Each structure stands twice: as C-alpha cells, then as structure tokens.
Amino acid sequence: MDFNFVESDEHKMIRETVEDIADDYDDEYWRDVEEGMWPEEFWQDCADAGFLGTMVSEEYGGQEMGLEEFGMITEEFAANGCLGVELLFVVNIVFGAVTLDENGTEEQKEEYLPGLVDGDLNWAMALTEPNAGHNAPNMDTFAEPQGDGTFIIDGSKQWISGVERADQMLLAARTTPVEEATKRTMGVTLFLVDPQDPAIERRELDVGIPTPEKQFTLDIEGYEAHEEDIIGTQEMGLYQLMADTVNPERLVSASGAIGVGRCALERGIDYSKNREVFDGPIAQYQAIQHPIAQKYAELQGAQKLVRQAMQMHDEGYDKKKVGEFSNLANLRASAVGHEAADVALQAHGGNGFSREYAVIEMWKGTRLARTAPGSEEMMRNFVAEHTLDMPRSY
C-alpha cells in the first residue's frame, strides 16, 4: 500500500478540535491531575467530541475510525501540554473499549461500550506480576474451574493503573498450568472482574514520576468469576492481547511520546528566544540550536514510522507485520521523545528543574515510555528475532 502522510481535511478537523479543548487546561490543571485529581472536565470534553469512541463501532455509540485517528488525537493532546493523556487513553480506551470491541460478547459490548464512549465508566487491566514481569506466560495468578461454570481466582498483580476508580478490570489468569499447556503462551484466559470486590486487596505504589493514574499492587484471594465474565476465547487470552490490544497500546503510547517531545521542544525554543544571558537571546547560539534542530528532525521521522504502523493496523496487514512495526515505532518514538525533552530541559538551564516550566515533568514522563508499556530491551529482542531472523536471546 502507499502510505499517506499528508493531513486530510478530517485530520485537520481533529487537530483543531484537540487544540480547542486543550486550550482550556493549563499546566496548573495537569499538575493537579498528576497529584491525584481525576480530570473530569477534560474527560467529558473528550467524550463530547467523540474521542473516547474513536475506535468503537457506531452501533455502540462510537466513531468507527482507525488507530491512526486515535493516535493523532493522543499526539496532539500531548503536544498541547495535556501531560499523561496517553496513559489515560491506554488504560480506559485501549484496555477497555478496543479490547471489548474486538473480543467481547454482544452482551458485554452492549453493557459496557456505551459507558466507555460517554466517559461514564473507568477501566483498568491487570496483567503484569511481581515474579513474571515481561515474561507474561510465567504468571502465577490462577483461575481454578469449579465445574459449575465458576472460577476461583488467586494471585497477585503489580503496576496496575487506575484501579482505585475503575468500574471494571480486565484480568489475565492461567486456567491451565504452564507446564500442562500445549504451548507456554496458551492456557491464559481474560476475565472481566470487579476491582472493588473485597477479594481484591490493593496497595498503592510509591512512584516517583508524574502520572495521571496511580499505580497499585493487587492481592487476589478467592475472587469468584463466571463463564460469562470471560473475554474472548478461554485459554487464548495472551494471543488476544498480543493481536488486538498490545499493538494499539504501544502505538498510542508512542504517539504520546512524540507529542510530549514536540511540546518540550516548543517550550525550549520559546524559552531560548526570550532568555538573555550574554549578548542577545541564547537561541542564537548553535549550542542551543543544533540539539533542538536535530531532535526536531528525529521526531519527524519517528512520527512517520508511528503513522505507518497505525495505517498498517487499520488496513488489516498481517498481525505479525503490524507487531513488527509497532515495536519499531515504539522503540524509536520513546527514545527520541525522551531525548527531545532532555534537550529542552538543558535549554532551560537551571529553570528546567522548576515545575513552573513543566519540562522536568515531561522529562520524567518520557523516561517512563522507555520502560513501559514495553521495555526497549524487549522490543529490540522482538526485532532481532522476528524481523532479523536472529536466535531467540531470552
């Protein structure tokens, strides 16, 4: 296919709508969000604009657009200073609406998708575990079938976002022990669970980065789930996540990294034009100009790679190929997004470490993108093995 990177009228309208919404929320608002305030007004504005249902079928109130449009929305919000918006979108829309739209039953879609689209429901996903990390097939959480259509779930999860206000949570649990599964990637089932159930105890993690979603460890003991709570096909949960959830997650996160990088550079440029230390503004010196120009060029390239991966997703390319480009795009975008924030921080000098200018928050936030949702090392492993046909290294 020919990849089109020219802005269409529809994309221009999306960008202008994002800018109109973002103009109403300043740095102080997003600092309050980082400190625990739920961005209710912002979230409702996104719902009213149709953004929360961008990738949801029209029959459930969505816009039935593609990942490319959703990625553009994420990037533009981040570029306009809405820090952490990519995490909000991933947790609630990718983990919730996109996963349900792709794998949910008709009853599940009718019950939950309209609320997610309208902004009335909040979501979470519990996959990562303390003893497994990126080795998801090695998870300990187990859903024991009781023979009457129910399952008793026990286990623990870590680094779970936004559980304290989530109405529902997607939880991955083994229904067949890994040593008994025909493949180690099989035997995992996705369940829809109530995160506020007394059987799920949560402990907040002390996190040193600005995020709009608090992070938790979950201890699950004796949670009762039912067959109708299963999302998709029993035993195939990891395949469903990898095919329909992980690629959008990585590309939305990559879009956010690019947007934050753009925002940081713009602030670095504005600051350097107005900051006079010696003879004229510091923006006239190549020591300031060259790093900013270099990262601007690299952001442009990363943006095109992300858009190509999103267009491949939307055009229905082979999922393995989409996975390849999703990893490539996230790997590049997360690195250059953080490097751009670092350049902007340096351009601010000592003032860069003042929260007043917000670039230190961008620096910390983009550093997270190099570790989550997938670490750079695991993405390099994927590219080496699946793209370059090198031996599996882990």
Image (cartoon, grey):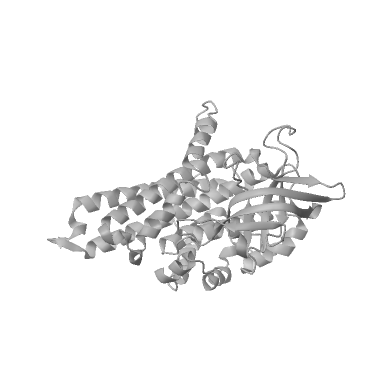
Q: Vertical placement of 315 versus 114: above or below?
A: above
Q: Position of residue 62 (x, y in %)?
A: 63, 63
Q: Nearer the viewer, residue 219 or 230?
A: 219
**Vertical position of residue 375 compared to residue 20: above or below:** above
Q: Quadrant of residue 365?
A: bottom left
Residue at position x 63%, y 53% in the image? 218
Whether residue 314 sits left or right of residue 299 in the image: it is right
Q: Position of residue 366 (x, y in %)?
A: 42, 53
Tell me what residue is drawn at x 25 percent, y 57 percent. Answer: 349
User: What residue do we see at 61% from left, 46% from top?
Assistant: 129
> Looking at this rendering, what residue extends furthest in the top direction?
391
Residue 95 at what x, y percent from top left? Answer: 62, 54
Number of numbered markers = 0
| Rendered residue at 24%/60% (across/down) | 272
The single residue placed furthest to the left in the displayed view is 279
Placement of 201 over or under 133, stated as above or below: below
Q: Nearer the viewer, residue 9 or 264?
A: 264
Compared to 74, does 294 lie above or below? above
Residue 85 screen position, x and y as percent: 50, 61
On the rendered image, what quadrant is the C terminus found in? top right
Residue 135 appears in the figure: yes
- The answer to whether residue 318 is visible is no
